[in-house]
Image (cartoon, helix red, strand yellow):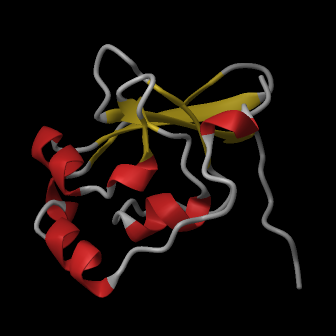
Amino acid sequence: MDIDATRRNKKPRPLSESERERLDEFIESIHYSSRYSDDHFEYRHVQLPKQMLKAIPKEYFDGSRGTLKLLWEDEWRALGITQSLGWEHYEVHEPEPHILLFKRPINYQPPVH
């Protein structure tokens, strides 16, 4: 289950200060699921407030699908999603485009510098 790089921006697209300010009001309403896993990955989904989608820049959306693109870590963190290290946005739940699906390897250990 590799990430489809064609569904991402070529590189992370930073938010402007005004874009970030528009998103601030929604951050407290972001919902994080409990973690669940299979033999290889742990998963969680993050539910954004539906109204928040209207404040996210259009460059974060996939026009052909009508959903968010697969976001780089810098992008989802800029939206106000806070999670520990190692999570990767791998899918959008298309029937409910405000739900983002994340995964990371089981027993993930951040790199030591």
Query: Could you tell me if residue 34 is visible in this image?
Result: no
Near-viewer residue (84 or 88) = 88
- In the figure, residue 23 lies in which quadrant? bottom left
| Side of 39 relative to 29 (left or right) | right
| Side of 113 relative to 65 (left or right) | right
Query: Could you tell me if residue 40 is visible in this image?
Result: yes
Tell me: residue 11, above or below residue 103: below
Q: Count up the numbered dots.
A: 0
Residue 36: percent from the left, percent from the top?
A: 54, 27
Residue 4: percent from the left, percent from the top?
A: 72, 31
Give the residue drawn at x 22%, y 81%: 18
Q: Which quadrant, please, contains the N terminus?
A: top right
Q: Residue furthest front?
A: 64
| Side of 76 relative to 66 (left or right) | right
Near-viewer residue (84 or 54) = 54
Tell me: residue 40, above or below residue 94: below
Residue 72: percent from the left, percent from the top?
A: 60, 56
Near-viewer residue (22 or 10) = 10
Give the residue drawn at x 24%, y 51%: 30
Near-viewer residue (108 or 65) = 65
Give the residue drawn at x 16%, y 44%: 49
Tell me: residue 65, above or below residue 20: above
Give the residue drawn at x 88%, y 78%: 112
- In the figure, residue 25 lies in which quadrant? bottom left
Q: Residue furthest top?
A: 95
Residue 56: percent from the left, percent from the top?
A: 28, 56
Q: Which quadrant, please, contains the C terminus?
A: bottom right
Tell me: residue 2, above or below residue 60: above
